[in-house]
Amino acid sequence: MALDTESLIRLLVVEDDPVVLQSITATLAGQYRISIAKDFKKALQLVRQYRFALILMDINLPDGNGFDLCRQVKSISEFTESIAIVFITSDESSETEVKGLEYGAVDFMHKPLHPELLKTRLAMHVRFQRRTALLDQLVYLDSLTEIGNRRAFNKRLEQEWHRAMRAKTNLALVLLDIDHFKVYNDTYGHPAGDECLRALAKSLVTTFQRSSDACFRYGGEEFSVLLYDCNTEQARLLMDKALADFRALAIKHENSPTAPIATFSAGVSSIIPVTENMDEFVAFTDLQLYAAKEAGRNQIYAQDAHFEAKAN
């Protein structure tokens, strides 16, 4: 039966000694999806190309040193900052280990590498990464709806804002909330209200399926959606569909002044970011949500973002 290498954890080995390389690949074959770089330049190229979980790195490279490579890897992005870097070296001085740890390595192993120790140490770092990732998910997950929470929204907004700024493209934001949700809870009870919130979250996730789309529970009955590389009109059309899809669920809301079923109101805006005015962008979008409510709810109000730019 063929090995499914796609399911294996990615490991980058940065080493130019063919004997050490052969030993490492023979020891770890079948346990990791291994890439090899024999110099500093190739290692950086591969890190930018693939999502590695681990890097096994020699300190002495033909065109540089592992300390500088470690520092550059950690500075590329938020993802690469979390890569577990393990140095391999013949230098057993404590000063070298201290320097490596200060640069961001998680471990040191000394040559010649003992096969079983190598496997055990790397497996330990993989387990730690998985536990850390699980804790991160819990921190950024809304437990009721199982989509991102307000903290996740704030983090993603900052990431997407700077990505759009670099690419000089649009970033669209949607703020929405369920119409007369207090009345809904008073009529049907909070457990039913929770089910309504879950239904909206599921409906939004079904509508927004691009990898760059992200839905969040913003707070209470309010939700938010971030749409990278999407202008105001495109976002409005998507929200028209999202509202139609939610209304199609026909969730009974008999005491709503707006409609006999659950609906929502939404504000939409987009911007090509040029300065650090994310807060103003959110506030402007919130004004569009307010306008949708003032106009009678159960609708989308969209406008290109415009406000006084904050000085750098």
Image (cartoon, rainbow, N blue to C red):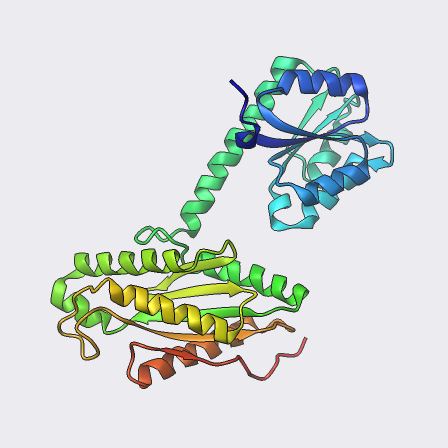
Could you tell me which quadrant the C terminus lies in?
Answer: bottom right
Residue at 37% x, 56% y is 206
Q: Is residue 168 above or below residue 105?
A: below
Residue 220 in view here: no
Q: Closest to the observer: 290 or 112? A: 290
Residue 270 in view here: yes
How far across and how far down the image is residue 141, in percent? 40, 51
How far across and how far down the image is residue 140, in percent? 43, 52
> Left or right: where does residue 299 sit relative to residue 133?
left
How far across and how far down the image is residue 282, in percent? 48, 73
Q: Is residue 99 above or below residue 166?
A: above
Residue at 48% x, 69% y is 173
Residue at 50% x, 75% y is 232
Q: What is the tally of numbered marks visible in this picture?
A: 0
How far across and how far down the image is residue 1, in percent? 51, 17
> Left or right: where does residue 258 sit relative to residue 285?
left
Specify the quadrant of the image occupied by residue 21: top right
Residue projecting furthest to the front? 1
